[in-house]
Amino acid sequence: MSLRLAMIVGASLLLALPAFAAEEQEPEALRGITVHDQRGAQLDLGLTFSDHDGKRVRLADFFDGKRPVLLTLNYYQCRMLCTEVLNGTVAALRGLEWSPGEQYRVVTVSIDGRETPELAAEKRRSYLEALDKGDVDWTFLVGDTETIAKLAETVGFTYRYDRQAMEWAHPAVIHFLSPDGRVMQYLFGVKYPVQSVKFALMEAGEGKVGSTFDKLIFSCFHYDALRGAYGPWAFGIMRLGGICTAVFLAGFVGILWRRDRARQRAHLAQTVELLA
């Protein structure tokens, strides 16, 4: 083997090492655990669960055609990731001027078919206390394994039980659903900027929530599906800049016009006075 060829092979192996290392470092339990983009998918609103009070409810009960729904899939005895996701959700909702039940609703579903309404009620109490907005419209649900799996499949949420660790492996994501029960948007991770949550609710609400000013600001941001987050949108910012410029020019022209009219009236008054 020539020296040049040896150097090329060596460099290729060095470049490949990080990829091999990353593959080796990925735990077996997490392989295949991801979020599939299911935006536009319609939920089966006939799916039945039990709420934190033990009452049998259907998904249809949470979609009124007016308010979007923020959905989280967790399990109530989780010691790690679920807590981070719910803590991040609470932090975002605390910073939002809107309240669950007014402009939007929140639903949390356990992915563990063994969990009970009592566990759901306990979890709800702790998170409503952390949210500090009173007894708002945030429902915690439990259901059977098959029903949970149908819901998770529709929203693109994958999960798996790790028998060795005795816990569920799942992604960190929150879902935003339209008022009629369609998957509209995702936010990934365990920390959700207040602005991104607001935009996701506005987009899921299809124009039914948010003030005129909110919608104007929203037009300057764009959803990045790869990052699962909102970022500035150059075209939107340019468009907003154009609108602001047009408003400014219209106001400026209006001021000049009013001044000119005032001068004309003053001149006319002087002329009349001289002729009198």
Image (cartoon, rainbow, N blue to C red):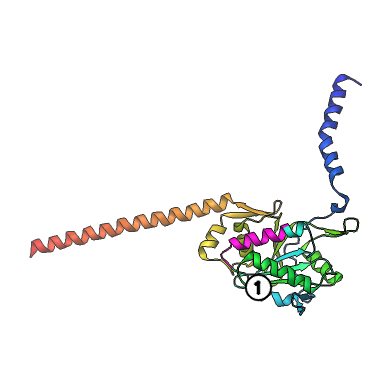
- Does the segment drawn in magenta span residue 89? yes
Question: Which structural element holds mark 1?
Answer: loop
**Can you tell which quarter of the image residue 48 is in?**
bottom right
- Residue at 86% x, 28% y is 9
Residue that lies at the very extreme toward the bottom in this rendered image: 55
The quarter of the image holding the N terminus is top right
Q: Residue at x 71, y 77 (%)?
A: 61
Residue drawn at x 85%, y 39% is 20
Q: As drawn, is 275 to the left or to the right of 238?
A: left
Magenta segment includes 259? no
Which one is nearer the viewer's eye here, 272 or 54?
54
Quadrant where the C terminus lies? bottom left
User: Which span is picked out in magenta?
Assistant: 84-98
Q: Which residue is farthest left?
A: 276
Looking at the picture, tell me which residue is in the foreground, 205 or 131. Answer: 131
Query: Relative to residue 263, is residue 173 drawn left or right?
Result: right
> Which image quarter: residue 228?
bottom right
* Residue 108: quarter of image: bottom right
Q: Which residue was labeled with disc 1? A: 137
